[in-house]
Amino acid sequence: MALAVVRDLRSQLRLETAEEVAAFEQDLLAEFVLARASAGVLDDTIRGDVGPVLALREWFGRPLWEMEAPDLDRYFGRHRRDSASGTKVRQAAAFAVFFEFLELRHKASIHAATGFVVESPLDEMNRPRGGTSARLRIPPPEAEVTALFGGWRCDMEEARKYAPAARNYTASRLASLIGPRISELCLLRIGDVRWDLGRFGKVLLKGKGSQGRGKKERPLINGSRDLLEWWITGPRWEFDDKVNDPRAPLFPSERRYGDGSSRAVTDDALRTGLAEAVARHLPHQIGHLTPHVLRHFAASDLYRNGMDVVAIQEILGHEWLNTTMIYVHVEKSHVEDAWIRAGQRATTRFGGTRR
């Protein structure tokens, strides 16, 4: 049997000009974005990956497949030396994903086209590390959060501007009860509160977790229904007379449109309101207790009160269960407490004692 000549059918790409290199880089980036989208990664997360990669390319001045570990040493050690540790950790994660994409899909083609063997410049020596506080947002204990909102509620009666104080309180308290994002709070309309849905009523949230699929229903549990009933029938009227207009903002701004109706509150106003309350009632939490940390508190509080993690995942609007697990922070005694609760349920169901 005679041997035939084997010919490589792949296109023999050779990058000769700067224009060809730039076009190839653009194609790689477009494919990277498409691959991440096909995996179900959120648009905001993809943008969070692409932004640091483009910044690194601009600093490096050459295609990233030419980058080696000493180059990244200079980037983090000099160029980004003063950046916050959490920022550098997020950038490193974006670089790791992008270089993994290059290695998995295009290592051979890049070598054929350029002569460079692409390898991630990140290693265990230069990978930025964040402290525990940079990775985790640990919410305050339940007693401290209760003290915060108790003091804040009392302050409202003497506030120079009652209506904005009540608005900031209600929005932050809602975040601590069922965990909506601050962006979702700002987008809420009167008509998004549906008292007639489900056993407790529901609120329709549109934000990061919606992914363009419309509004998501969240049940008004954990005291959130009582809170919103108090807000809508009381302090909300201080802003305008649009309380019965389903299109009016649930949390209005003091700024108004030409017809006298209120604009929607901004996230800056809600953040400032929370920060001022924390400074008065939990000063040791200044700079730490944010609207997002209240979202962590809500997840932890619901878990402590017996809600399973899958239900909490739905409440928070997470796509992945492992994301929800990051939000659940439990006390050191949670194993013993869970055992006691399980024993009580078993005793009730079967009678007798559990040993």
Image (spheres, rainbow, N blue to C red):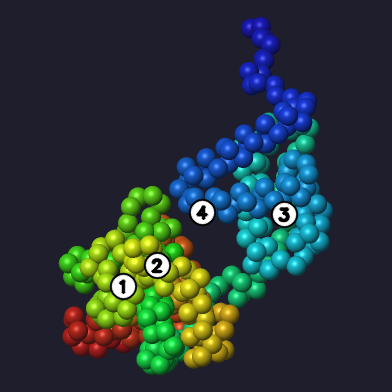
- Nearest to N terminus: mark 2 or mark 1: 1
Q: Is residue 328 visible?
A: no
Q: Which residue is mark 1?
A: 240
- Nearest to N terminus: mark 3 or mark 4: 4
> Which corner quadrant holds the N terminus?
top right
- Nearest to N terminus: mark 4 or mark 2: 4
Which circle, 4 or 2, is nearer the viewer? Answer: 2
Query: Could you say which quadrant of the image residue 229 lies in?
Result: bottom left
* Vertical side of 188 occupied by 214: above or below: above
Q: How dense is the environment of label 3, judged by Cα within 10 Å: few (below 14), some, or many (20 and up)? A: many
The amino acid marked with disc number 2 is Arg
Q: Which residue is mark 3?
A: 122
Numbered circle sitting on residue 44: 4
The amino acid marked with disc number 1 is Asp
In front here: 28 or 162? 162
Give how far apart the Cα atoms at labels 2 and 3 are. 51 Å
State the image coordinates of residue 113 (x, y, percent, origin top left).
73, 29
The amino acid marked with disc number 4 is Asp
Q: Is residue 166 visible?
A: yes
Give how far apart the Cα atoms at labels 3 and 4 are. 23 Å
Residue located at (24% from left, 89% from top) = 353
State the image coordinates of residue 231 (x, y, percent, origin top left).
29, 78
Residue located at (78% from left, 41% from top) = 62
Q: Secondary structure at mark 4?
A: helix
Residue located at (78% from left, 44% from top) = 61
Q: Residue furthest top?
A: 2
CB atoms of marks 1 and 4 within 8 Å: no
> Which corner quadrant holds the C terminus?
bottom left
Q: Secondary structure at mark 1?
A: loop
Q: Which residue is mark 2?
A: 256
CB atoms of marks 2 and 3 within 8 Å: no
